[in-house]
C-alpha cells in the first residue's frame, strides 16, 4: 500500500469537467506492452501462460519518478482540472471513468498519442497498458503552461482531444470515427453489467468440522518448537529486505528505530502523525471467510490503536481464485460481508480498493486473501506508543481473554501438520471493547509498551517486544489452558502491555473489571517460561533476524543445483 500526504485544498480529482478543455496524455510513450493485460489477469494460470508475455506491462521506475515530480509541479500551476493514472484497459478506461464522473464526454484523436512503435492499430492504442502514463484535463488556454512543465522533465506530453458535452466517448483515427460509446456504459455503477453468481459452501469445510483438538498431544519440546516457529518465513523479520534500501528516506518514518505496531509517519509542519498498516491472515479467511475477513479489519485497527492512533479509513486488495467456481465465489461473498460488518463497527469507510480474481493454477486457487490497508491519525506524534519493553522489572499483562485455542495457527499448520481447522476465537464486540480500553490506558500514560498478539501467538509477540532493548521476559502459563495453546495459539483480541511496577495499582483500577491477566515481568535479557530457562533474548533475536536470509540462500542454492 502506498500512502501520501497532501495539504487540504491542494488535491486534484479524477473528474473531467469544462466543455472544450483540452485532454492530454502525459508520461511514457504508448507501446504494445500490456495489451490485454486486464484480460490476462482474468484467466487461470496454466502451462502455456508464458505465451501471453506481451500482456505483461514493462515498468520503468526512473521514468515513474520523473512523472511523479512533473505531476506535482503541473498541479501547482493551477492549470489542471482533473487527472487520472492509466491502469487496466489504458486509454479506454481512464477516459471513461473521468468522463462518467464529470457527466461529460470526450473526443479523442488517437493518431496524436505518442507511440513507441510505428503503425499501432486503433484497438492497440485504446487497450495498451504501458506504464508511467497519465490522462490530464487542463483549463483551456493553459496548454503551454502544462506542456512546458513536462518538457522540463523530458516527458512526452500531447493534446489528444477535448471535453465534450454529449456524454459520448468518440475515438477518431486520422479523422475517421473508429468507436463511439456513452462513458456511462463502461463504468461501475453505470451501464456496465452486474452479475449475481451462484455460490456454495466449500467442500473442505467438512474436514474443518472434523477438527478435534483433544486428539493432539501437548509436546514436551516446546522450546524447540518455538525456535522453529520464530524462523518461519511468514513470521521472521523482513529486515533483510528493507535494509537493502533507505527506509528513512524523506525523514518522515518514525518507526524504524522505535518500532510500533503500525508504521507511524510524521506530518511535517504539524504535531500530527499518520499510522499505516496492512493486514490479512489468509489461513483464517480460508477457515471462515466471514470471520477471517473481520479479523483482518480488526487487526489493522488494533495495530493503529496500539501505537496510539485512531483508525480512520480502509482500502483493500481482494485476492481470490476463479469466481466462476461456486466455492471460490462463496469465499468472496462472505469475505465482503465480513469486511463490511467490521468496517461499520470501527467506523472506517472503505475509500477504494482492488479485486484480483483468477489467482490459481491447475493445482487450485490461492487461499482467499482480502488484504486490508488502513490509516489512522495521531493528534500528537509525541504521544506515540511503541511496542518494545522499556525496563527490567516492569510487569507484563495480557489484555483480553487468553483462550484454550490453537485453531488455524502457524503452530497447528507447520508443527502439527494440521491444515484444516476452524478460524481462531474472535468476537467483534470484544475486539472493539479491547481497543477502547487500550486507547484509554495509553491516553492516561499507564502503559510503557503495547503490542498486539497475532501470528505465532503470545510467545512471538513477547519476543518482538524484547528485541529493541534486548530485554527478556519471565512468564507463567495458565494451567487451565494447554501450554502449546497458551504460547502459540492465535486467538484474537489480545494485547500485551508492560506497566511500571509503581503504576500497577492505578492500571488495575482503570481496568475496572476488563479481562486482563498478569503473566510475568520484563527481565534484563533472560527468557523464562514457567521457571525454565529458554536462553537469552539475543539468541532469539538472531534467529528472528537471520531466518529469512538463510531461507532464501537455501532456496537459491537449491535452484542453482537443480539447473546443473
Image (cartoon, rainbow, N blue to C red):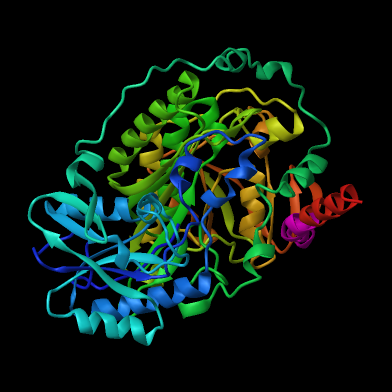
Which residue is at a point 74% across and 28% down the rendered structure image? Answer: 417
Q: Would you say residue 546 sits in the magenta stretch?
A: yes
Q: Is residue 321 above or below residue 139?
A: above
The magenta stretch spans which residues?
538-550
Q: Is residue 321 above or below residue 517?
A: above
> Residue 406: where, in percent of width, then height?
63, 30
> Residue 450: where, in percent of width, then height?
50, 56
> Residue 147: where, in percent of width, then height?
27, 81
Q: Nearer the viewer, residue 413 or 12?
A: 12
Q: Nearer the viewer, residue 458 or 156?
A: 156
Q: Is residue 215 above or below residue 93?
A: above
> Residue 350: where, in percent of width, then height?
30, 46
Q: How many numbered circles does the render carry?
A: 0
Q: Nearer the viewer, residue 27 or 282?
A: 27
State the quadrant of the N terminus: bottom left
* Image position of 435 (left or right of 186): right
Q: Nearer the viewer, residue 181 or 41?
A: 181
Which residue is at a point 32% across and 41% down the rendered structure image? Answer: 343
Examine the rendering and report whether any part of residue 536 can be seen.
no
Q: Would you say residue 208 sits in the magenta stretch?
A: no
* Image position of 475 (left or right of 17): right
Secondary structure mostly seen in magenta is helix
Q: Quadrant of residue 476?
A: top right
Q: Is residue 285 above or below residue 109?
A: above
Q: Quadrant of residue 44?
A: top right
Which residue is at a point 52% across and 70% down the rendered structure image? Answer: 61
Examine the rendering and report whether any part of residue 330 can be seen.
yes
Amino acid at each position: 500500500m502506498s500512502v501520501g500526504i497532501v495539504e487540504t485544498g491542494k488535491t486534484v480529482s479524477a473528474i473531467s469537467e469544462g466543455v472544450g478543455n483540452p485532454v492530454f496524455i502525459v508520461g511514457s510513450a504508448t507501446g504494445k506492452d500490456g495489451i490485454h493485460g486486464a484480460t490476462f489477469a482474468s484467466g487461470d494460470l496454466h502451462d502455456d501462460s508464458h505465451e501471453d508475455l506481451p500482456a505483461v506491462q514493462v515498468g520503468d521506475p526512473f521514468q515513474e519518478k520523473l512523472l511523479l515530480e512533473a505531476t506535482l509541479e503541473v498541479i501547482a500551476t493551477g492549470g489542471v482540472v482533473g487527472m487520472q493514472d492509466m491502469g487496466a484497459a489504458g486509454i479506454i478506461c481512464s477516459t471513461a471513468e473521468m468522463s462518467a464522473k464529470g457527466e461529460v464526454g470526450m473526443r479523442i484523436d488517437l493518431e496524436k498519442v505518442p507511440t513507441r512503435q510505428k503503425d499501432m492499430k486503433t484497438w492497440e492504442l485504446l487497450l495498451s497498458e504501458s506504464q508511467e502514463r497519465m490522462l490530464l484535463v487542463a483549463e483551456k488556454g493553459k496548454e503551454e503552461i502544462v506542456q512546458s512543465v513536462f518538457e522540463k522533465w523530458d516527458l512526452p506530453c500531447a493534446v489528444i482531444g477535448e471535453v465534450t458535452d454529449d456524454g459520448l466517448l468518440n475515438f477518431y483515427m486520422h479523422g475517421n470515427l473508429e468507436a463511439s460509446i456513452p462513458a456511462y456504459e463502461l463504468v461501475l455503477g453505470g451501464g456496465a453489467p452486474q452479475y449475481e453468481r451462484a455460490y456454495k459452501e466449500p467442500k473442505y469445510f467438512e474436514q474443518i468440522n472434523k477438527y478435534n483438538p483433544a486428539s493432539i498431544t501437548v509436546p514436551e519440546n516446546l522450546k524447540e518448537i518455538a525456535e522453529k516457529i520464530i524462523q518461519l518465513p511468514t513470521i521472521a523479520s523482513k529486515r533483510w529486505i528493507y535494509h537493502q534500501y533507505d527506509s528513512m528516506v524523506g525523514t518522515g518514518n518514525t518507526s524504524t528505530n522505535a518500532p510500533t505496531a503500525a508504521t507511524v509517519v510524521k506530518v511535517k509542519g504539524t504535531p500530527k502523525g499518520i499510522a499505516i498498516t496492512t493486514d490479512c491472515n489468509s489461513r483464517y479467511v480460508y477457515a471462515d471467510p466471514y470471520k477471517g475477513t473481520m479479523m483482518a479489519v480488526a487487526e489493522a485497527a488494533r495495530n493503529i490503536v496500539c501505537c496510539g492512533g485512531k483508525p480512520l479509513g480502509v482500502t483493500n486488495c481482494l485476492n481470490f481464485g476463479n469466481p466462476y467456481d461456486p466455492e471460490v465465489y462463496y469465499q468472496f461473498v462472505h469475505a465482503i460481508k465480513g469486511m463490511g460488518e467490521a468496517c461499520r463497527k470501527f467506523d472506517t469507510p472503505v475509500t477504494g480498493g482492488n479485486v484480483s480474481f483468477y489467482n490459481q493454477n491447475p493445482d487450485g486457487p490461492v487461499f482467499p486473501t482480502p488484504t486490508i490497508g488502513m490509516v489512522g491519525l495521531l493528534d500528537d506524534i509525541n504521544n506515540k506508543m511503541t511496542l518494545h519493553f522499556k525496563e527490567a522489572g516492569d510487569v507484563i499483562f495480557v489484555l483480553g481473554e487468553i483462550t484454550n485455542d490453537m485453531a488455524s495457527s502457524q503452530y497447528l499448520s507447520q508443527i502439527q501438520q494440521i491444515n484444516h481447522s476452524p478460524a481462531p476465537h474472535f468476537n467483534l464486540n470484544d475486539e472493539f471493547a479491547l481497543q477502547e480500553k487500550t486507547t484509554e490506558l495509553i491516553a492516561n500514560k499507564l502503559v510503557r509498551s503495547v503490542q498486539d498478539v497475532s501470528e505465532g501467538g503470545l510467545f512471538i509477540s513477547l519476543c518482538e517486544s524484547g528485541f529493541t532493548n534486548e530485554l527478556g521476559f519471565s512468564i507463567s502459563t495458565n494451567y487451565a489452558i494447554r501450554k502449546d495453546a497458551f504460547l502459540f495459539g492465535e486467538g484474537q483480541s489480545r494485547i500485551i502491555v508492560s506497566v511500571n511496577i509503581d503504576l500497577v495499582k492505578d492500571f488495575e483500577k482503570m481496568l475496572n473489571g476488563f479481562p486482563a491477566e498478569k503473566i510475568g515481568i520484563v527481565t534484563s535479557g533472560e527468557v523464562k517460561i514457567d521457571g525454565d530457562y529458554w536462553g537469552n533474548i539475543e539468541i532469539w533475536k538472531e534467529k528472528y533476524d537471520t531466518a529469512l536470509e538463510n531461507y532464501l540462500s537455501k532456496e537459491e542454492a537449491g535452484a542453482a543445483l537443480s539447473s546443473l
